[in-house]
Image (tube, rainbow, N blue to C red):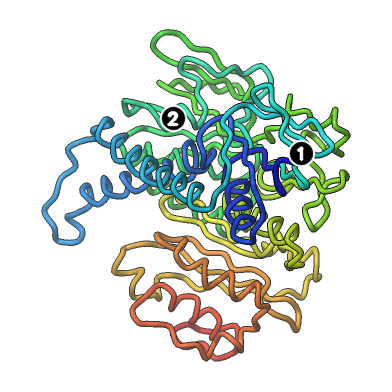
Amino acid sequence: MTDADLVILGGGSGGYACAFRAAELGLSVTLVEKDKFGGTCLHRGCIPTKALLHAAEVADAAREGDQFGVKSSFEGIDMSGVNSYKDGIVSGLFKGLQGLAKANKVNVVEGEGRFVGPNSVEVNGQRITGKNVVLASGSYSKTLPGLELGGRIIASEQALNLDYVPEKAIVLGGGVIGVEFASVWSSFGSEVTIVEALPRLVPNEDEHSSKQLERAFRRRKITAKTGVKFTGASQDANSVSVTLENGETLTADLLLVAVGRGPNTAGMGYEEAGLTMERGFVRTDDRLRTNLANVYAVGDIVPGLQLAHRGFAQGIFVAEEIAGLNPRPIEESGIPRVTYCKPEVASVGLTEAEAKERYGAEVSTFTYDLAGNGKSQILKTKGAVKLIKAPDGPIVGVHMVGERVGELVGEAQLIVNWEAFPEDVAPLVHAHPTQTEALGEAHLALAGKPLHVHG
């Protein structure tokens, strides 16, 4: 006997999106979650980090008021007040999700679930069976071999709940999580050093974006040591020391380990049930089906971008797939990406290197400097919009750096996903003065009719 049309293991972005959409489509749903509904993104990831980043933005605005003719001063950070603001946002969104689960008649079972196959999940000594099973068990903060978390060596989960501002901080890892925390702590008044083994910060972004961010961080006095490997760390009651492959030793109050996130699949019963796995990830086809019949996987346990909105989209896709709606597969390169440091880095589609690998050397690019954009000058932000175009083809990549450019990625993803040509976008009217004009100007230039730039 089956308990539901759909049993979901994990209540993060992918799991709850799948549950709500499936319920809308008339399916009976049971969702198993060991912690809090909403998962990492809501409680320990996207939402609380962005609250910290906004508090950092307010701190910078107070500190920099003079350049706008406003007499203001930065008196310091009240971490209890910051945490209260952050926790209030998380709490409000959590209550909203709980209400939606009730309204959608999703049966939420609290407890540590384990997949026992072929179509069952075990939780609290009870076996729950579904016609379909969706695995959405999320991810965890990784560390490096021999580097144990504890004391002054922390991961992002602990960094979110600090009750003080470190005087000096070392961030191990220059990816999204690393540069976001570096940005927050610098704005709060910390002296920050980032250590990244790869040659540049945000190494998954276009090289031009990395260079723009590195320049901005230098202006902010954030030190970035790139192309250098970490070799060890030690701590005592007062400090933590980090040694690098080049023989250098760094000392700080805290070491944040931000070397990425791993799939939360160990001990979940996946391999024992016969699932095809790869480096801890669950392998799926383009319809998110695993090798087991009627068993799907979504979110961070599926190889690819580890983004909440990717999991969310995959959850909706799987619900519609199970309901027989035959949805269109999600194109991974069409998923927008934003790093919310100061300045923001936003992109969608292929980098220039990826485009050349796919289409050859004839790829066209155009970079529009935000110095030519009125609203960016009002905001006093530096940066650029870079477009990448396939030979005799559409725009295949949009890469942006600057304050608030994350808000521009919505239009950018429409351009890339609808395979628009520069000539399609150039006639569109962009409101003045807005930063979206930068996208318009870049497309005008690539269409051969530059307005405020030399083509």
Q: Looking at numbered disc 1 in the image, what kind of residue is underneath it?
A: Phe
| Residue 258 percent across, percent down from the top left | 56, 33
Q: Nearer the viewer, residue 187 or 132?
A: 132
Q: Quadrant of the C terminus?
A: bottom right
- Compared with 226, 388 (above or below) is below
| Residue 207 percent across, percent down from the top left | 62, 56
Q: Quadrant of the N terminus?
A: top right
| Residue 311 percent across, percent down from the top left | 63, 51
- Say which quarter of the image contains residue 449: bottom right
- Compared with 115, 325 (above or below) is below
Q: Tell me the element at label 1.
A: strand
Q: Tell me the element at label 2.
A: helix
3D distance between C-alphas at marks 1 and 2: 26 Å
Q: Residues within 10 Å of mark 2 (few under 14, many from 20)?
A: some
User: Which of pointers 1 and 2 lies earlier in the amino acid sequence?
Assistant: 2
Instruction: Identify the residue at the far top of this view.
Output: 237
Q: Looking at numbered disc 2 in the image, what kind of residue is underneath it?
A: Ala
Q: Is residue 407 left or right of residue 243?
A: left
| Disc number placed over residue 281 in the picture, else none | 1
Residue that appears at 74% across and 24% down: 267
Q: Nearer the viewer, residue 425 or 270?
A: 270
State the residue position of label 2.
Answer: 159
Residue that appears at 32% across and 29% down: 165
| Residue 138 percent across, percent down from the top left | 64, 38
